[in-house]
Amino acid sequence: MKIVMYLIALGVIVFYSFRFIQVMIRMKHTILLPTTSDEREVLRKYPQKSVARATYSEQKWGIVVYLFMLLFMYSIFFIGLFSDDFEVTFYLWFFLPLIHSHELFNVFAIVDDGIISGSRFITWKNMKSFEFIRIDINHKFYGYSREVNDEYELRIKTKGFPISCIVTSSDMIDKLSKILNEHGVVRDDKSEKSQ
């Protein structure tokens, strides 16, 4: 049982380390959208605030916290590996920092080979479809901010978990639709916003 937990923990550490390195590398690429402060103002990862630039200086707190999360995971792994009386249930602490790790970066940016969304990078080939969902009274983001009420959430279905972004401008909806279509991501038929 202990060997299985070691292998699971090692797999999780490697996966999250790879994701972090992948996002750090993509932040150095040329950002195609949003490029101006006006474009960043109409995109939101969270209802309360607009996205920040996809640069190390703008995302420094997210980077620092993510690094501490990885260091915590590595330390728990090595403590468990070299301790004889280490309980397998202690590995539950190992998964604690992962609960909100996707919320550490306030970034949604399109680069040449995919999209950076929070602490994830998704390549174009891993995206299946997208849709714009109206933020009405039944939507989970309704009521958090006046700016997002009656606007749209872009939801992109991927081969893994979906990614999303709040869009508060019809011009940005058109730009995003055009870019996604150009890269072979199809619009979902259920989408409420017509082009």
Image (spheres, helix red, strand yellow):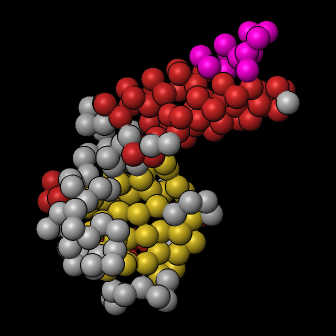
Percent across and percent down for residue 87 are 73, 20
Query: Quick one: 33 or 12, which is closer to the camera?
Result: 12
Asked whether, in this view, residue 106 is left or right of residue 117, the answer is left
Query: From this viewpoint, is residue 13 visible?
Result: no
Q: Is residue 143 above or below residue 56?
A: below
* Quarter occupied by the C terminus: bottom left
Q: In which quarter of the image is residue 82?
A: top right
Name the chief secondary structure element in magenta: helix
Residue drawn where x is 51% and y is 79% of the image: 186
Residue stretch rendered in magenta on the structure:
75-87
Query: Quick one: 83 or 185, which is closer to the camera?
Result: 83
Residue drawn where x is 17% and y is 63% of the image: 145
Percent across and percent down for residue 122 are 52, 55
* Quarter occupied by the N terminus: top right
Query: Quick one: 187 or 8, which is closer to the camera?
Result: 8
Asked whether, in this view, residue 23 is left or right of residue 75, the answer is left
Q: For residue 77: magenta?
A: yes
